[in-house]
Amino acid sequence: MARPRKSRLVPSLTTFAEELVRAITEHVDRGLAATGDRLAREVAELRREVARLRARGEAGTPGAGGRPKSARACSVRGCAQPHVARGLCKNHYQRLRYAERKESVEGSS
């Protein structure tokens, strides 16, 4: 079997390839380090937010805004649902609104 020829280019190509691999590796390492730092900051921020929300929930404070719940009951006899508006529960209040709208449409005709 014949021996392969030695080329003058092989050592320089090998050196070039090694330098290219080294440069790419350094670039990727810098990118990964920056991404890791950013992710670590975001995780820390999320942990603080979760801790704040847990503390808020444990303190018994109401959820995300809105009106406080009323202790009053619906004023319709026999209905024990909580009061929403005009002394009525949500179901009776919607019936009242429907009747008022129907009346205003019939009255305007």
Image: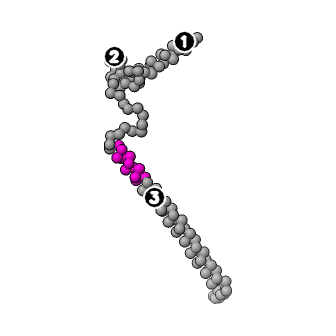
What is the secondary structure assignment of the residue under circle 1? helix
Circle 2: residue type: Arg
Question: Which residue is the site of mark 3?
Answer: 41
- Label 3's element? helix
Q: Nearer the viewer, mark 1 or mark 3?
A: 3
Lower position in the chain sequence, tag 1 or tag 2: 2
Residue 21: image x %, image y %?
A: 58, 74
Q: Nearer the viewer, residue 28 or 87?
A: 87
Image quadrant where residue 68 sits = top left
Which residue corresponds to mark 2?
A: 77
- Tell me where residue 5 appears, x and y as whole percent: 66, 87
Instruction: State the residue position of label 1.
Output: 106
**Mark 2 to mark 3: distance in Å?**
58 Å
Please provide percent x and percent y for residue 28: 54, 68
Colour theme? one colour
- In magenta stretch: residue 41: no
Figure check: 21 above or below 44: below
| Residue 22 quadrant | bottom right
Q: Nearer the viewer, mark 2 or mark 3?
A: 3
- Residue drawn at x 58%, y 11% as measured from the top left: 109
Compared across the picture, whether 73 is left or right of 45 comes to left
Q: From mark 1 to mark 2, how far is it between C-alphas? A: 28 Å
Q: Position of residue 106 (x, y in %)?
A: 54, 12
Residues in magenta, as a range: 46-57
What's the residue type where badge 1 is placed? Glu
Relative to 4, 65 lies left or right:
left
Q: Earlier in the sequence, mark 2 or mark 3?
A: 3
Q: Nearer the viewer, residue 94 or 42?
A: 42
Q: Residue at x 38, y 48 (%)?
A: 52
Marks 1 and 3, Cα distance to the nearest angstrom?
A: 63 Å
Mark 1 or mark 3, earlier in chain: 3
